[in-house]
């Protein structure tokens, strides 16, 4: 099959005329053509390069005209009425079988059927067995009838497309696990998908359409539901999470979205989609309970455990003072190690509490100056005098507490792991289209690339705690904080080349902006 023929067939398929009995589609047009042009034969044909489908005919057509493509092939190349006064005198038709043999067609007039995309779909033709002509009025009538054929074809195409779209929507609705339904202003169910109908006993499903959803509720419940649906008509859409007693008696939690819509006459309806979120809501409750228990544990760890630790530290100090004269140097060193371990435990309890609080009560985003905010962070750390912190003087919009937590931990980390008592920390901020990119660069010993993934793990330290005090939660808190804002942190570093931590923080709007 040629590409042109295949293309024409695809065009005609859009009009849904190839899979139906098309030989009677335009009989009224054919009748009008013969009567208006005073000719014995008329034909409406839909064609491609090699094949003609007769959509309607008027007059006793011999098989030669039905099978021969010469006349229609001529007309489809025109934009106006093609008229051949005498087919025996025209080089294009004088050798045609239907001209030289019965029925000896001697006259032809045809007009192409051209759609809005300037595609030729076929022709409207009239024939005579005698040389003849048509006047200007008859030509205008043929063109008008051709437009009518195209209009009817376009209507078929639109109806066909609507039918396919309706079938698609129906397939989507019927295969959707959500409960989909539509009600009118009297709360009668006008449409319900299979998932909705399956809630009811099989013998009652055919009675659901037209049934008022309020009948099964008490007067008090009916009033509440009526008020809720009135809000939909007033506000266009609502969302609710509610517990619903299914017809089976089972209680489920549904997340229901209702939206108002109107038909062509302006009558209002409600489209509802209910999703069963019973398991999700149960999981949320479990997570809330678990978080509550974790908060309680963190509180106990930070308060109840600190008291005995501080008491132990005081007892050790008293013993050390009372027995200082009789204790050997090694024993005094052991007492010092005990106090260091107690301080480390206090630090761990403090960081555990801070880690558990990440993401809670962070406050709204606000306009901040990066240099001023950073200054407050490193002043609270009490940096050694030899450390210089250089910060870009830029304004940003971020929540203050989380930003201070991130900056404080990154600065503390740079100082803590530096090999010298002096160093340089540079903090820069790049204002990207959707994010702030904040980099914290130090001139410290650097980090082996093989350890880059390890440093963000909880309780992980690159050096023994006897060398560098720390809980191993600093960078983990930074990563957790950023995750709460869909941000991320990465590192660029190598041994002996310092380290750069790059924070990517999505932009937010300050309150009131």
Image: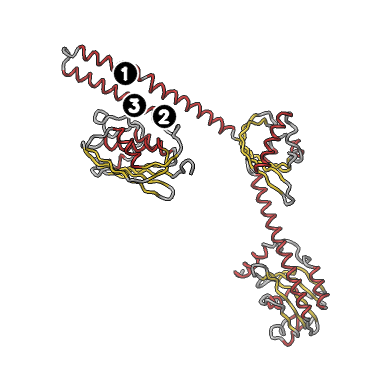
Which image quadrant is residue 305 in?
top left
Kindly identify which residue carries mark 3: 348
Q: Secondary structure at mark 1?
A: helix
Residue 137, label in figure: none
Viewer-side residue, 404 vs 207: 404
Marks 3/2 in contact by CB < 8 Å: the verdict is no
Estimate the spatial distance between the alpha carbons at disc 3 and disc 2, rounded to whole Å: 12 Å
- In this rendering, is residue 370 above or below 243? below
Q: Earlier in the sequence, mark 1 or mark 2?
A: 1
Q: Nearer the viewer, mark 1 or mark 3?
A: 1
Quarter that holds the N terminus = bottom right
Indicate the secondary structure of the residue bearing disc 2.
helix
SS label for mark 3? helix
Q: Residue at label 1?
A: 310
Q: Residues within 10 Å of mark 3 (few under 14, many from 20)?
A: some
Q: CA distance from mark 1 to mark 3?
A: 14 Å
| Image-based side of 269 in relation to 476, left or right | right
Tell me, yes or no, if residue 180 can be seen here: no
Query: Can residue 42 be seen in the rendering of this structure?
Result: yes
Mark 2 or mark 3, which is nearer the start of the sequence?
3
**Tag 3 or tag 1, which sits nearer the N-term?**
1
Looking at the image, the residue that sits furthest to the bottom is 89
User: Which circle, 1 or 2, is nearer the viewer?
Assistant: 1
Q: x, y percentage for residue 317?
A: 24, 16
Q: Which numbered disc covers residue 356?
A: 2
């Amino acid at each position: 099959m040629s590409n042109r023929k295949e293309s024409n067939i695809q065009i005609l398929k859009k009009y849904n005329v190839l899979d139906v009995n098309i030989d009677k589609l335009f009989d009224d047009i054919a009748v009008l053509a013969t009567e208006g042009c005073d000719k014995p034969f008329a034909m409406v044909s839909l064609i491609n390069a090699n094949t003609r489908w007769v959509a309607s005919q008027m007059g006793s057509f011999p098989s030669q005209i039905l099978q021969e493509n010469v006349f229609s092939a001529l007309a489809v190349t025109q934009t106006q009425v093609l008229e051949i006064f005498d087919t025996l005198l025209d080089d294009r038709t004088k050798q045609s079988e239907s001209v030289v043999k019965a029925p000896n067609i001697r006259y032809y007039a045809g007009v192409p059927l051209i759609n809005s995309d300037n595609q030729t779909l076929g022709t409207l033709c009239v024939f005579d067995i005698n040389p003849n002509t048509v006047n200007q009025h008859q030509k205008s009538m043929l063109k008008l009838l051709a437009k009518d054929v195209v209009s009817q074809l376009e209507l078929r195409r639109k109806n066909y497309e609507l039918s396919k779209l309706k079938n698609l929507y129906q397939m989507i609705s019927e295969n959707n696990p959500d409960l989909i339904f539509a009600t009118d202003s009297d709360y009668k169910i006008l449409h319900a998908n299979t998932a909705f109908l399956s809630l009811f006993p099989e013998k009652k499903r055919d009675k659901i359409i037209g049934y008022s959803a309020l009948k099964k509720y008490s007067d008090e419940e009916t009033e509440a539901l009526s008020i809720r649906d009135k809000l939909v008509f007033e506000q266009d859409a609502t969302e609710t999470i509610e517990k619903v007693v299914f017809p089976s008696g089972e209680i489920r939690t549904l997340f229901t979205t209702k939206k108002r819509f109107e038909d062509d006459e302006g009558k209002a309806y409600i489209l509802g989609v209910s999703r069963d979120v019973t398991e999700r809501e149960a999981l949320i409750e479990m997570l809330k309970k678990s978080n509550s228990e974790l908060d309680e544990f963190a509180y106990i760890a930070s308060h109840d455990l600190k008291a005995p630790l501080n008491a132990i530290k005081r007892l050790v100090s008293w013993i050390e003072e009372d027995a200082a004269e009789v204790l050997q140097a090694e024993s005094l060193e052991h007492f010092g190690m005990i106090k260091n371990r107690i301080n480390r435990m206090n630090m761990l309890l403090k960081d555990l509490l801070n880690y558990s609080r990440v993401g809670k009560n962070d406050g709204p985003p606000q306009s901040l100056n990066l240099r001023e905010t950073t200054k407050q962070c490193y002043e609270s750390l009490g940096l050694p005098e030899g450390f210089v912190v250089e910060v870009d003087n830029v304004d940003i919009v971020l929540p203050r507490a989380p930003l201070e937590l991130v900056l404080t931990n990154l600065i503390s980390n740079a100082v803590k792991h530096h090999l010298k008592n002096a160093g340089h920390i540079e903090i820069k901020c790049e204002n990207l289209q959707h994010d702030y990119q904040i980099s914290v660069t130090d001139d410290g010993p650097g980090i082996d690339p093989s350890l880059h993934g390890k440093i963000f793990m909880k309780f992980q330290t690159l050096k023994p705690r006897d060398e560098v005090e720390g809980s191993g939660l600093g960078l983990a808190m930074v990563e957790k904080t950023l995750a709460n804002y869909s941000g991320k942190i990465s590192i660029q570093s190598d041994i002996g080349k310092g380290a750069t931590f790059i924070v990517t923080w999505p932009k937010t709007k300050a309150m009131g902006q």
